[in-house]
Image (tube, rainbow, N blue to C red):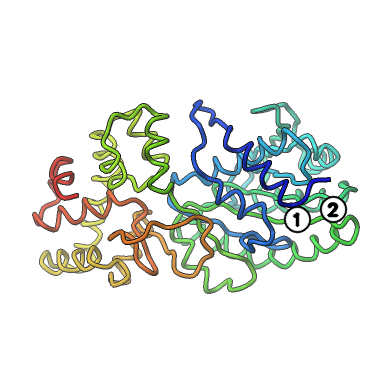
Amino acid sequence: MMTSKDVIVKIISAVKNYRTPLGVKFVDRELEVEKVINEEEKAIFNGMINVLYGPKGCGKTTLFRALQSTIELEDLGVDVLYAAGEYEETPQLIKLYISKTLGEVLKEIASTIGGSIEVGFRDLNVISAPITFFKAAKVIVESIVKKLRKKRRVIVVIDEVRADSEEHLSNFRGWLEVFANDIGYINLDYKDKTGGSIAIIALVSDALVAEIRHIIGPKVTWSFMWNLPRKAVKELAEELHLNIDIDTLWKLTGGNPRALHVIAIQGVEKWFKEEILKDVRNLYRDALEIFRDREVTWRELERATCNIDDASISLLRSMLRRNMAIYIGAATPLSELPINEPWIKEDYAYQIPAYYYTLRTMISKKSINITLNSVLNNL
């Protein structure tokens, strides 16, 4: 019989061989896999909603799709049920990806939500139904307790939860406050019946979610995932056939997998103009509207590049809303953060360093009309 350690080693080994739908190897996420699977790590708690956030494009979705697909290959007592959808309270089409080991639960969910069953990506069962995010999550965990008669560790992943506006933040907060209590009782019921456990992981890419953290408090756990470490950038760059200096790639992307993919497809010049320069220019316009004076605006922006933790609250909120910055202060890290980098401080960080270097270049020239070359010369 395999021990918990054996299961973790087997899953990590399988994830190393996972390839994304684009055919690219899933690079360097052993640490994150272990922290999700290993209950002794105290990163993901059973019987709770675990909010996992991180920079846009850092690989949250791919991590859990890789976990689900590799766990499906062999019955290891762990199941990942993945729900692709949003949480607004209006009916929409939500897809639930369910492994074959949860076949007992499949028909119960489909019957309750009125969805159709089909075979989807990597032969996972898929239920599609017009249903709200809130109802889908509750139906899933109640169906597990009702139909699953064996001991399993079930991880329910709700992907792309939106927290990009006051309305979305309010909706998400309301769901967390209500369902955080429900999931605790539902988990106890399942544990009493089988000895198993249920955990909910809500994946969020909108940095504004940090604003409700102190309101929700200990009802839910808060973790964050980061971009790839520097040593993995070279490996992914080779996978993507990127013929760009690794040090330059690191200082531009900070190891963000999506940024590296886009650069491989579009080229660094187009990526810079469409993904970075546009956002930093808009941030300048936000700041000018906040401070109403050009000299004060440049001074406050410079303050934010010297130490993002010292940025004015209004400017920082604009950076969070635009997903240029992210809060890292009190959440449990799933990933190792780079050390001694100017774009990462104690409480906040730039999501990718290109934002930091572009902003710094604009400040040095006191102009938003800069080029990629001027930024590269400022790295």
Residue 92 is at least partly visible in this image: no
Q: Is disc 2 placed on a helix, strand or loop?
A: helix
Where is 241 relative to 206, above or below?
above
Q: Which residue is mark 1?
A: 198
Where's the N terminus, which quadrant?
top right
Kind of residue at disc 2: Val
- Residue at (64%, 28%) from the top-left corner? 121
User: Quarter of the image holding residue 248?
Assistant: top left
The residue lying toward the viewer, choosing from 126 and 47, is 47
Q: Could you tell me if residue 111 is visible in this image? A: yes
Instruction: State the mark number for residue 145.
Output: 2
Label 1 vs 2, first from the N-terminus: 2
Report whether 245 appears left or right of 348.
left
Q: Secondary structure at mark 1?
A: strand
Judging depth in this view, the residue of 95 and 251 nearest the camera is 251
Q: Residue at x 69, y 59 (%)?
A: 39
Indicate left or right for 343 with 116 as reference: left
Q: Does residue 338 appear left or right of residue 40 in this picture? A: left
- Circle 2 crowding by C-alpha within 10 Å: few under 14, some 14–19, many from 20: many
Between 8 and 93, the residue placed more toward the observer is 8
Which residue is drawn at the image coordinates 67% and 55% (left, top)? 38
Q: Position of residue 240 (x, y in %)?
A: 39, 29
Q: Name the residue rendered at 25%, 65% in the picture.
A: 304
Q: Are marks 1 and 2 in contact (CB under 8 Å)?
A: yes
Mark 1: amino acid: Ile
Question: In the rendering, at what x and y percent does residue 88 appear?
Answer: 58, 51
| Residue density around tag 1, few if under 14, some if 14–19, many if 20 or more, within 10 Å | many
